[in-house]
Every structure is written in C-alpha cells, then in structure tokens.
Image (cartoon, helix red, strand yellow):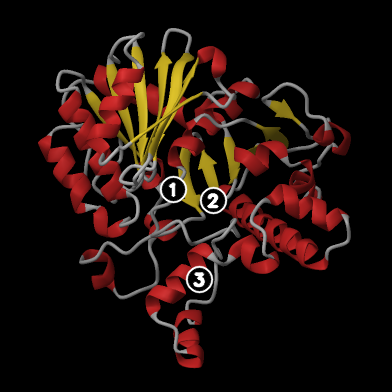
Amino acid sequence: MRVAVLNSGSSSIKYQVIEMSGPHVVASGMVERIGESEGRIVQHDRAGEGSQGRITTKCIPDHATGFALLLEGLADIGPPDAIGHRVVHGGEAFRQPARIDASVLETIRSQEPLAPLHNPANRIGIEAAMAACPGVPQVAVFDTAFHQTMPPEAYRYALPEELYTEHRIRRYGFHGTSHAYVSGCAAACLNRPVDDLNAIILHLGNGASAAAIRGGVSVDTSMGLTPLEGLVMGTRSGDVDPAVHAYLQRATGMRLADIDDLLNRRSGLKGLCGENDMRAIVERRAAGDERARLAFEVFCYRVRKYVGAYAAVLGRLDALVFTAGIGEHSPAVRAGIAGHLDALGIELDREANEKPGPMPADVSNPGSRVRILIVPTNEELEIARQTVACLAAGPGREST
C-alpha cells in the first residue's frame, strides 16, 4: 500500500509517498510559490532524497493546479492508494484521525478561527486533492489530536468559564504526530511496552515543545491555545507575562496585530541575539559572543524548567527524549539541558553525547536512573501509519 502524505501551506504543498510494506519513501518533494508569478516543483525519487532534486518552474496559480502538477510528477509510480493530510488544529472535535467526507471537511473549516494561519491552507490542500483524486480514500491527521488525552487540570486556563464554553479557549498543544511517533520509538529502544513508559519528549527545532507522556498518552504539553506558549523558540517568545500586551500598547502605542507579530516572528532566539539558527548561535557562543551566550542559556534554562515540572507531573520518569532538528543534532544544547539534571536522576554521558552513533541513541551514563535518548522524528511516517489505521478501522470518526 502506498500512502501520499501531504502538508499544505498557504503557498506550498510538501509531500512524501511512502510504501508501507517497507516502510520506505518512494518519492518526495514540494510544490512551492503557489500564487506567485513563477512557481517551483521540486521532486525527489528515493535515491535522490537529501539532494537538491529536480526543479521545474512554471506558473502555479492555485493549489488545484499545484496538486495536478504533483500528480504529473508521480505518473511513473502511479496514483497513491490513500492520502494522509496534516491538519494543524482539530480543536476538541477530533481526538483521532478522521476519514475525510463533507462533514469532516466542514468541521475542519469550523476550527479555522483557532489556527487562521494554518487550517485554511490545510483545508484548501484537502479540497484540491479530493477534486483530483475522487476515488482515493483520504484521511486528516491532526497535530492537536494526540494531546486531547490531557486532563482538565492540564488544559484549562484560569479564565472565566464562558471563555471556555463559548470560545473553547484552552491548551491544545501541537507537534502531536511527532510526540506520538517518538514516544513509540523510545519504548522500542528501551525494549519496554509503550503503555509502561513514562517519558518527557523534547521536540526542539525552530518550533519547540515539551510533552509529558504517561504510558504512551499525553498528560501535559508546553504549547497552548496556539504554538506561541511554552518553550523559547526560533522566533517565538514562548511564555511571557500576559500583561506584556497591555503594557506595550500603553507604553509604545503598538497595535494588537503588531504585538502578535512581535511575539511570533521577532522574539525567541532571534529577539535575544538577532539569530534564530541554533547552529550559528552555538558558534557565536563558542567565540565569546555575549548575546549568543544569553540566548543559548535562556533556551536551555526554559527547557530545564519544563523538565522539572513534568517530572513532578509524571511521578516516575523513565526517559528524557530529544528529537527534531536541534534535539537530534546539537550536542551543546543536549548538554546544556540534560547536563544539569542530575538531581532528577538524569545523568548525561558527555562523551556519548558528542558522538552518539547510530540512531536512536542512548547518551545517558550507565548508572543513570533515567535514560537519555536521541530519537529522530518522522512525522510523515506517523501520518501514513495513522492514515492506514484509520482506514482499517472502517467508517466513522471519534469526536466530542
């Protein structure tokens, strides 16, 4: 069975076609600059993964045209047997993946106020794929669904009741497909059933989140109503005093939209040192750059605070797991976090951390009570797996 995994943005469609019997990727690529005067189609075959790929330029006025061009590029391998779509926000409506029909599509549309930058683009991509491939079953997989297991004390904000009941203001969490995939891989790495593993997953990239996982189930996560809450990120501030908004408005005359842009696109690591690439920050820190040192320390300190809090939530902690671009590839960041958590039974092997070897990798001291793992994430494969499982379960969807 071949599953095409699609991630539709406002001006792009990223895709992978995965042969599930391997599993292995048989094709991947991106249609980008949709709606601009000159669009691009970037295609990779399996042998070309990681290379620049074949690039074609032409006018791509809309997502429907982009998806048609995507299918043309896949003509040599044939149409997929199923299509899995990444959808950022499922709100409280979706606790599981959902086979897409008119009702599901309308419910996805109803969640757009919760993710106005993402869900409309996700929906447009779905509509283009359904029009082009009407006979191919399609499934929506939601970033928020994995965290719908959080108890009310974790997801409710201390705000008036009507803001929750009427406007659904609560913590939702994101990176759910990554946290689900990585928690399963961590259990396999430790030869333990996933339902017997308590872990803190650190998805650290330009976007970053922590999740407390008890027995394979999310019980808390750092992102909230939007992806802005929680850890320091590349350009997002993470946690700040909510009164910052009103103060900035009074002190500077900034509009609400400008404050939102400030916190989402001009803060985080970039705000602290002018740079949102952790690789460059680590280099500048090593060269004695004080702003880079501060950005690095703030990033690691915030993560350590969440690890301590989630260790208390879980009670028993079996594994601390690093994933995503920074988590997988930055020994300095791993040391800046895990190298200061001995009091929690988290003891880093600094030599193994510098040269972790084949992935997944265990970089904890042999005597560490909590294992420290590096597990590469694979959100596309997780979406493909959830797509297959959803179709195998038959019609219907779980919703609240």
Looking at the rendered image, the disc whose residue lies closer to the viewer, 1 or 2, is 2
Relative image position of residue 340 (x, y in whole percent)? 80, 52
Element under label 3?
helix
Quadrant containing the N terminus is top left
The picture quadrant where one finds residue 225 is: bottom left
Q: Nearer the viewer, residue 317 or 155?
A: 155
Q: Confirm or deny contact between disc 3 and disc 2 (CB under 8 A).
A: no
The residue mark sitting in front, 3 or 2, is 3
Q: Which residue is mark 1?
A: 174
Residue 251, position as x, y percentages in the image = 51, 92
* Left or right: residue 278 compared with residue 399: right
The label number, if any, that marks residue 207 in the structure image: 2
How packed mark 3 is, by other alpha carbons closer than 10 Å (few <14, some 14-19, many 20 or more), is: some
Looking at the picture, which amino acid does disc 1 mark? Phe
Q: Few, some or many C-alpha atoms within 10 Å of disc 2 (few <14, some 14-19, many ≥20)?
A: many
The residues tagged by marks 3 and 2 sit, at their Cα atoms, a distance apart of 16 Å
Q: Nearer the viewer, residue 41 or 48?
A: 41
Query: Hey, what amino acid is under mark 2?
Result: Gly
Q: Are marks 1 and 2 in contact (CB under 8 Å)?
A: yes
User: Disc 1 and disc 2: Cα gap in Å?
Assistant: 10 Å
Q: Residue at x 81, y 56 (%)?
A: 284
Regarding mark 1 in the picture, which secondary structure is present there? loop
CA distance for labels 1 and 3? 21 Å
Instruction: Name the residue located 28 percent from the left edge and 30 percent from the top edge.
Output: 67
> How far across and down, in percent of the image, does residue 3 sit?
35, 18
| Residue corresponding to mark 3 | 262
The disc, 1 or 3, on the residue closer to the chain's N-terminal end is 1
Q: In which quadrant of the rendered view does residue 182 lie?
A: top right
Q: Earlier in the sequence, mark 3 or mark 2?
A: 2
What is the x, y in percent for residue 99? 21, 29
For residue 49, above or below residue 141: above
- Residue at the (68%, 24%) spot, across then down: 359
